[in-house]
Image (cartoon, rainbow, N blue to C red):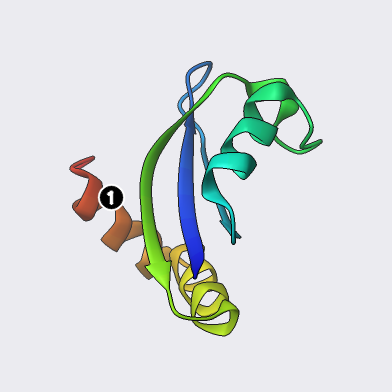
Amino acid sequence: MYYLYILQSKIDNRLYKGITENLRKRFKDHNSGKVKSTKPYRPWILIYYEAHRNKILAEKAELFYKTKQGRRQLKKKLGFE
């Protein structure tokens, strides 16, 4: 299984979208500063994830959520609107 996940920074509420096979480990990596792009915005909270059968499907979902339409849909799912 591959997971699309969305993190929210407790510092400035920015969102980070990513994919991984091991969600728990990846979440720990983000909060321990091992991920260069998210290190300055720690701590992070996991606000959403979805499981996909394979990496290709997870990558497609990640790319969609990075589009304007995808961000809009995500905001609705998360109750940000």
> Measuring 36% from the left and 69% from the top, which residue is drawn there?
69
Q: Amino acid at mark 1?
A: Lys
**Mark 1 secondary-structure assignment:** helix
> Measuring 54% from the left and 71% from the top, which residue is drawn there?
63
The total number of labels drawn is: 1
Q: In this picture, is 60 found above or below 32?
A: below
33 left or right of 3 in image? right
- Mark 1 Cα within 10 Å, few/some/many (few <14, many 20+)? few
Q: Quadrant of the C terminus?
A: top left
> Measuring 62% from the left and 41% from the top, which residue is drawn there?
25
> Considering depth in this image, is 41 or 81 the residue closer to the camera?
41
42 left or right of 32 in image? left
- Percent from the top left, x then y, of residue 19? 58, 60
Q: Quadrant of residue 43?
A: top right
Q: Give the labeled residue for mark 1.
A: 75
Q: In this picture, is 61 found above or below 10?
A: below
> Measuring 53% from the left and 49% from the top, which residue is drawn there?
23
- Percent from the top left, x then y, of residue 73? 27, 62
- Percent from the top left, x then y, of residue 52? 43, 74
69 left or right of 20 in image? left
40 left or right of 67 in image? right
> Considering depth in this image, is 31 or 16 the residue closer to the camera?
31
- Percent from the top left, x then y, of residue 49? 38, 53
> Considering depth in this image, is 74 or 69 the residue closer to the camera?
74
